[in-house]
């Protein structure tokens, strides 16, 4: 499908508008709607899920065509929706593992949103780097798509025969490095990631949880980014979806 569409020439200002809008929504999410920590119930979660999914659909059918202009076709909308659904499906494994991480670190429900907020922000930065690097490689070496496909096939087979997933922080290199440079408190300090321990700056268990979430998301991105490049190589659609 991707080969039937002309390459999108997206003006830099459109990238700025999109990224700026995402940052504004994240700021509102943390600074307004979740200014006071609280446990997110099923009804609230369903409401926000509906809002964000509706905004994505609006972007595909209304906002993106207005931003990009006449070169945005029905085919591009289809590619965006396909990529969005694929990434949403792949994110379910993310959600399951993050739930295990929260359970392992015994993160109180009212503090979980803060970890997710910074986790999403970090994921945006990491995935942006990987997407632009991947797009650059594909445009120079188109055959690399076959390597992506083989990697996804091997990963799928590995997942098929894998046992139950476990959270093992002691095997996480990032957490081991953090422990090497900072002492770690055994107590939560509200929503804080840092505290004082014997006169030294120390990490809280919430900080270790965030590190675990970020590194886990990076691992999952290695799967999901090749998946969407198999749908389209349009960098704008890959990143926005």
Image (cartoon, rainbow, N blue to C red):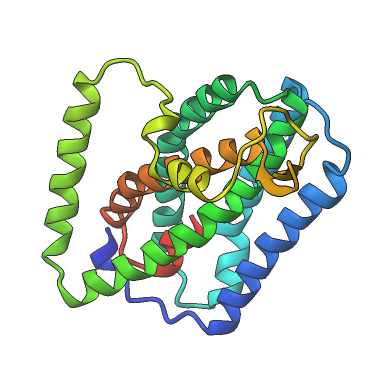
Q: In this view, does 215 lie above or below 159?
A: below
The structure residue drawn at horizontal position 53% and vertical position 51%, both measured from the top left corner, is: 181
Side (left or right) of 188 relative to 171: right
* Front-lying residue, 213 or 32: 213
Q: In this view, does 14 lie above or below 103?
A: below
User: Residue at position x 67%, y 25% from top?
Assistant: 107
- Image quarter in which the N terminus is found: bottom left
Q: From the top left corner, tell me how far across and down residue 70 is, in percent.
A: 50, 77
Residue furthest top in the image: 164
Which residue occupies 45% across, 68% down?
Answer: 236
Relative depth, front residue between 65 and 209: 209
Q: Where is residue 233 in the image (x, y as percent from the top left)?
A: 31, 65
Residue displayed at 80% across by 54% down? 28
Tell me which corner region of the image, top left, top right, bottom left or bottom right, holds residue 24.
bottom right
Relative side of 101 to 9, left or right: right
Q: Position of residue 202 (x, y in %)?
A: 67, 45
Left or right for 162, reference 73: left
Horizontal side of 140 relative to 179 (left or right) equals left
Report the number of discs.
0
Q: Would you place residue 77 above or below residue 194 in this image?
A: below
Residue 94 pos. (x, y %): 46, 34
């Amino acid at each position: 499908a991707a080969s039937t569409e002309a390459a999108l020439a997206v003006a830099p200002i459109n990238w700025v508008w999109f990224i700026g809008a995402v940052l504004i929504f994240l700021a509102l999410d943390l600074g307004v709607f979740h200014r006071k920590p609280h446990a997110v119930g099923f009804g609230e979660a369903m409401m926000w899920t509906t809002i964000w999914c509706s905004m994505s659909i609006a972007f595909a059918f209304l906002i993106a065509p207005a931003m990009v202009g006449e070169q945005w076709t029905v085919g591009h909308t289809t590619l965006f929706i396909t990529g969005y659904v694929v990434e949403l499906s792949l994110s379910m494994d993310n959600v399951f593992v993050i739930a295990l991480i929260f359970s392992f670190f015994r993160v109180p429900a009212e503090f979980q949103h803060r970890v997710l907020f910074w986790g999403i922000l970090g994921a945006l930065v990491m995935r942006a780097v990987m997407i632009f690097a991947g797009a650059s490689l594909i445009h120079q070496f188109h055959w690399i798509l076959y390597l992506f496909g083989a990697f996804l096939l091997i990963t799928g087979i590995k997942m098929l025969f894998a046992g139950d997933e476990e959270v093992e922080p002691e095997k996480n290199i990032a957490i081991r490095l953090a422990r090497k440079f900072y002492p770690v408190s055994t107590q939560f300090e509200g929503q804080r990631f840092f505290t004082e321990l014997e006169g030294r700056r120390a990490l809280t268990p919430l900080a270790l949880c965030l590190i675990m979430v970020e590194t886990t998301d990076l691992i999952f991105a290695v799967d999901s980014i090749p998946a969407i490049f198999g749908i389209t190589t349009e960098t704008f659609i890959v990143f926005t979806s």
